[in-house]
Image (cartoon, rainbow, N blue to C red):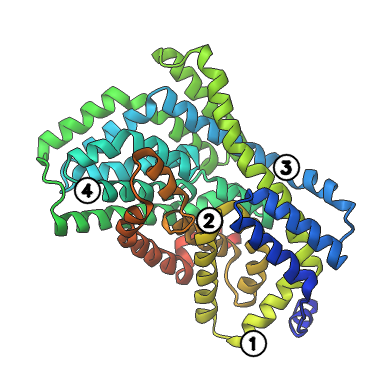
């Protein structure tokens, strides 16, 4: 009843809100790092609005990141880095290529499949785009794919990095909304596989229309023999994802424990294979620390911002404004998806999650959307932003690898964006896709 009463109040926002918002937008346009822009905007909001004492900012920064669940983030990032350095990622590609050699456009399909395999370990889109891009783009071009399309294919396939568990994005949204990351991982499995399948199907259709790849296809016993040969040669590479999935889905390991176990096992495999040396550790740790150093400050500064907005009643005012426009749950869901797509085009996933999740969650509650379904819909929709300009992080990663024009790559990525949006709509309107694997208490 108290929440309903809040919804009936029209909250008018003044320059104490719009001023910091304009400062934030201006800093982003000037190229100031996201975490610094959020920090300045948050400080301005606290000073002008008086919603919370400014003295609480320092305490909030440390309390916001003082969570055991966040330890999983650097662990999965490090696992992905070790995976590449030990050469285990190439074993994934060999198996993926063997599995898809019966299809038209086999190596293109293998590229998408290996993106999914890498995602099941690293939990990062950009890392997957860089690792898979280095292995496959040159071969895709040799197979007959235009370079911009090859880049778009890798960038799209790497979107599964935050969609297939273990995913850093689900750890972050679980922290923000107080939901178990393990529960979100279970809910994300079917939607993540659907996104992967949508990209595979899109590539097959585009390849059939444009006749890019005409490689010889193996069938029957030849295909089976090829798969068995690839598995015999690289079966040990799958120990890591098996440990992660078994540990998390059986409840034997928390995401943090699964990440730690995965790091140790990957390092041991690297030493056994002779592909990892002690001298590799400084650069490997530095590389992972740089990625982690981008994510954690954003979370630290975004949480006080979310608290200040909540204290000002912005989420309640937002719910009131939207429900005044329409009471149709179907239209409200479309509005939320539109907001998330627009936000994903101009800002990275982590700040979008920390800022928008507390804003949109009350709206989802108002229309009766399951909170787990809301989280999966939000992350999946934001995942599309990795291949949509102007920010499209994966576009920049593959462009940096190949020096190909971002505009050319983004134009070739349009079919993949459309197919992913179809899955987003399915997730938004079919709750069972997100809740089937969950205990009844979450349905």
Q: Which residue is mark 2?
A: 438
| Residue 89 falls in image quadrant | top left
**Quadrant in the picture for the C terminus:** bottom right
Nearer the N terminus, badge 2 or badge 4?
A: 4
| Residue 370 falls in image quadrant | bottom right
- Could you classify mark 3 by the number of other residues whose Cα lies within 10 Å: few (under 14), some (14-19), or many (20 or more)? few
**Gap in Å between the C-alphas at discs 1 and 4?**
49 Å
Secondary structure under tag 4 reads loop
Q: Residue at x 57, y 60 (%)?
A: 375
Secondary structure under tag 3 reads loop
Please provide percent x and percent y for residue 70: 66, 41
Please provide percent x and percent y for residue 112: 32, 46
Q: Which residue is mark 4?
A: 146
Name the front one of labels 2 and 3.
3
The one nearer the camera, 90 or 417, is 417
Residue 67 has which mark? 3
Q: Is residue 390 visible?
A: yes
Please provide percent x and percent y for residue 134: 35, 34
Please provide percent x and percent y for residue 269: 44, 19
For residue 190, side relative to residue 199 (left or right): right
Nearer the N terminus, badge 1 or badge 4?
A: 4
Name the front one of labels 1 and 4.
4
Name the front one of labels 3 and 1.
1
- Could you classify mark 4 by the number of other residues whose Cα lies within 10 Å: few (under 14), some (14-19), or many (20 or more)? some
**Circle 1/circle 4 CB separation < 8 Å:** no
**Gap in Å between the C-alphas at discs 3 and 1?**
37 Å
**Quadrant in the picture for the N terminus:** bottom right
Q: Residue at x 52, y 46 (%)?
A: 167
**Gap in Å between the C-alphas at discs 4 and 3?**
45 Å
**Gap in Å between the C-alphas at discs 1 and 2?**
34 Å
Nearer the N terminus, badge 1 or badge 2?
A: 1
Q: Which residue is mark 1?
A: 324
């Amino acid at each position: 009843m108290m929440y309903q009463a809040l919804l009936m109040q029209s909250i008018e926002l003044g320059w104490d809100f719009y001023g910091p918002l304009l400062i934030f937008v201006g800093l982003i346009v000037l190229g100031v790092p996201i975490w610094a822009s959020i920090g300045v905007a948050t400080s301005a909001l606290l000073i002008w609005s008086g919603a919370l004492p400014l003295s609480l900012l320092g305490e909030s920064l440390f309390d916001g990141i003082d969570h055991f669940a966040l330890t999983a983030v650097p662990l999965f990032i490090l696992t992905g880095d070790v995976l590449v350095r030990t050469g285990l990622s190439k074993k994934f590609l060999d198996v993926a290529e063997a599995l898809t050699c019966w299809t038209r456009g086999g190596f293109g399909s293998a590229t998408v499949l290996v993106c999914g395999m890498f995602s099941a370990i690293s939990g990062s889109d950009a890392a997957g785009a860089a690792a898979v891009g280095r292995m496959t783009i040159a071969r895709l071009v040799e197979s007959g794919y235009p370079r911009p399309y090859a880049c778009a294919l890798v960038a799209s396939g790497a979107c599964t990095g935050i969609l297939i568990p273990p995913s850093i994005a689900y750890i972050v949204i679980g922290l923000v909304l107080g939901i178990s990351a393990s529960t979100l991982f279970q809910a994300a499995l079917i939607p993540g596989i659907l996104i992967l399948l949508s990209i595979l199907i899109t590539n097959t259709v585009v390849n059939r229309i444009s006749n890019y790849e005409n490689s010889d296809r193996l069938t029957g016993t030849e295909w089976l023999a090829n798969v068995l040969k690839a598995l015999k040669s690289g079966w040990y590479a799958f120990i890591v994802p098996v440990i992660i999935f078994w540990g998390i889905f059986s409840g034997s390991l928390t995401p943090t424990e699964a990440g730690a176990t995965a790091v140790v096992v990957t390092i041991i495999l690297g030493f056994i294979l002779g592909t990892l040396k002690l001298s590799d550790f400084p650069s490997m740790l530095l590389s992972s620390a740089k990625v982690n150093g981008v994510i954690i400050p954003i979370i630290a500064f975004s949480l006080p911002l979310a608290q200040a907005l909540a204290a000002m009643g912005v989420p309640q005012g937002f719910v009131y404004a939207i429900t005044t426009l329409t009471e149709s749950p179907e239209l409200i869901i479309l509005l939320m998806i539109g907001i998330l797509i627009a936000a994903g085009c101009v800002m990275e996933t982590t700040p979008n999650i920390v800022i928008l999740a507390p804003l949109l969650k009350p709206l989802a509650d108002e229309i009766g959307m399951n909170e787990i379904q809301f989280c999966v819909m939000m992350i999946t929709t934001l995942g599309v932003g990795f291949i949509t300009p102007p920010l499209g992080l994966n576009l920049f990663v593959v462009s940096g690898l190949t020096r190909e024009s971002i505009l050319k790559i983004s134009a070739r990525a349009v079919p993949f964006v459309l197919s992913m949006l179809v899955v987003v709509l399915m997730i938004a309107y079919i709750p069972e896709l997100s809740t089937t694997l969950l205990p009844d208490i979450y349905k």
